[in-house]
Amino acid sequence: MGLTYVFRVRFYLETAAGVHTDPREFETVVRVTPPEPGESGWMLFRDALWRGEVNDDVYARQLAESWLDVSVVACEFAELRTDEDALDDLREVIAANLDEFNAESVREVLHKYFGSAIHIKSNE
């Protein structure tokens, strides 16, 4: 299964003059597969989350706009979906990089950034 970040995103459609949509705004669930732990960009959670929520609304909207190519009104973090194997891999890389997180343990890092928003699926 790997790691998947799940966000709830509200966006609107930009239309040409004289064209209208109803509704103008829409909501969707966005699932983002991050780079493998240790690869460039793997610390998305450190840069975007705090205690299971987005830490900067503007930055979160910019990320969502880059993923969707639409104008984003709101972006909320829902959860990290993972299986035990992928979570173990993430823990291992975090442990090797604890100084990057200003933390003393992997558990502290996971709680600091994901809060209780980690959903572990069975490997079966």
Image (cartoon, helix red, strand yellow):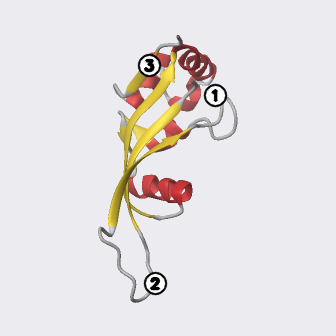
At which x and y percent is residue 109? 46, 24
Query: Closest to the observer: 16 or 69?
Result: 16
Q: Give, as a three-letter code, the residue at label 2.
A: Ala
Q: Which mark is residue 16?
A: 2
Q: Please state if 113 lies on the left or on the right of 93 as rendered.
A: left
**Is 54 placed above or below 100 here?**
below
Q: Nearer the viewer, mark 2 or mark 3?
A: 2
Tell me which residue sits at (58%, 14%) in the image. Answer: 85
Identity of the residue furthest to the left in this view: 23
The answer for how far apart the CA atoms under marks 2 and 3 are is 44 Å
Q: Few, some or many C-alpha atoms within 10 Å of disc 1 (few <14, some 14-19, many ≥20)?
A: some
Q: Please state if 15 lies on the left or on the right of 25 as rendered.
A: right
Identity of the residue furthest to the top in this view: 124
Which circle's residue, 2 or 3, is located before the other in the chain?
2
Query: Closest to the observer: 118 or 31?
Result: 31
Q: Say if residue 111 shows up in the picture.
A: no
Query: Closest to the observer: 114 or 98?
Result: 114
Residue 92, picture quadrant? top right
Q: Give, as a three-letter code, the residue at label 1.
A: Pro
Secondary element at image label 2: loop
Q: Which residue is mark 1?
A: 37
The answer for how far apart the CA atoms under marks 2 and 1 are is 42 Å
Q: Please state if 123 lies on the left or on the right of 36 as rendered.
A: left
Secondary element at image label 3: strand
Q: Give, as a three-letter code, the residue at label 3.
A: Ile
Q: Which residue is mark 3?
A: 120
Tell me which residue sits at (45%, 30%) in the image. Answer: 80
